[in-house]
């Protein structure tokens, strides 16, 4: 097993970008849509959605690429790439969803 380079393209990085980008677009508005019970609320936080898209896809690329190489010892190369990409993309998406929940809950 070789040490992965920072930002090196591999399957985990690609899956991390896709999961992070798609999730980052709507993650901050999901709590608002849940509280209102209206799916149209997902389009109300467009600026936050764009920030979530950019940050989550970048973080998903780096985390997915780094985790994948470390999982290859236990899983096959393809499976490790897919699992690490999903995990790497969901970490920033979960962070944005928690931040969105914090913003919409009354204090």
Image (tube, rainbow, N blue to C red):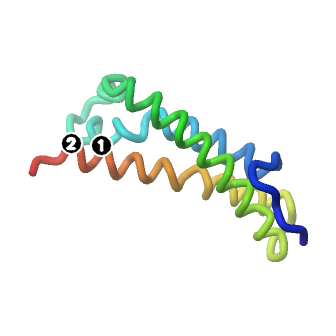
Q: Nearer the viewer, residue 34 or 48?
A: 48
For disc 2, the marked residue is 104
Q: Are marks 1 and 2 in contact (CB under 8 Å)?
A: yes
Across and down, in percent, residue 50 comes to 47, 28
For disc 1, the marked residue is 31
Q: Is residue 87 above or below residue 36?
A: below
Disc nearest the viewer among 1 and 2: 2
* Quadrant of res 58: top right
* Quadrant of res 63: bottom right
Across and down, in percent, residue 34 comes to 28, 41
Query: Which residue shows up at 52% across the image and 34% down it?
Result: 53
Across and down, in percent, residue 100 comes to 31, 44
**Residue extending furthest toward the right:** 1
**Residue extending furthest toward the left:** 107
Are there few (<14), some (14-19), or many (20+) residues within 10 Å of tag 2? few
Q: Is residue 95 above or below residue 44?
A: below
Q: Nearer the viewer, residue 52 or 101?
A: 52
């Amino acid at each position: 097993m070789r040490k992965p380079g920072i930002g090196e393209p591999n399957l985990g990085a690609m899956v991390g970008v896709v999961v992070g980008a798609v999730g980052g677009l709507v993650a901050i508005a999901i709590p608002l849509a849940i509280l209102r019970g209206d799916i149209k609320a997902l389009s109300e936080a467009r600026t936050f959605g764009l920030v979530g898209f950019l940050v989550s896809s970048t973080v998903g690329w780096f985390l997915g690429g780094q985790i994948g190489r470390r999982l290859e010892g236990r899983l096959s190369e393809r499976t490790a790439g897919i699992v690490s990409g999903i995990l790497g993309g969901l970490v920033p998406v979960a962070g944005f969803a928690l931040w969105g929940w914090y913003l919409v809950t009354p204090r």
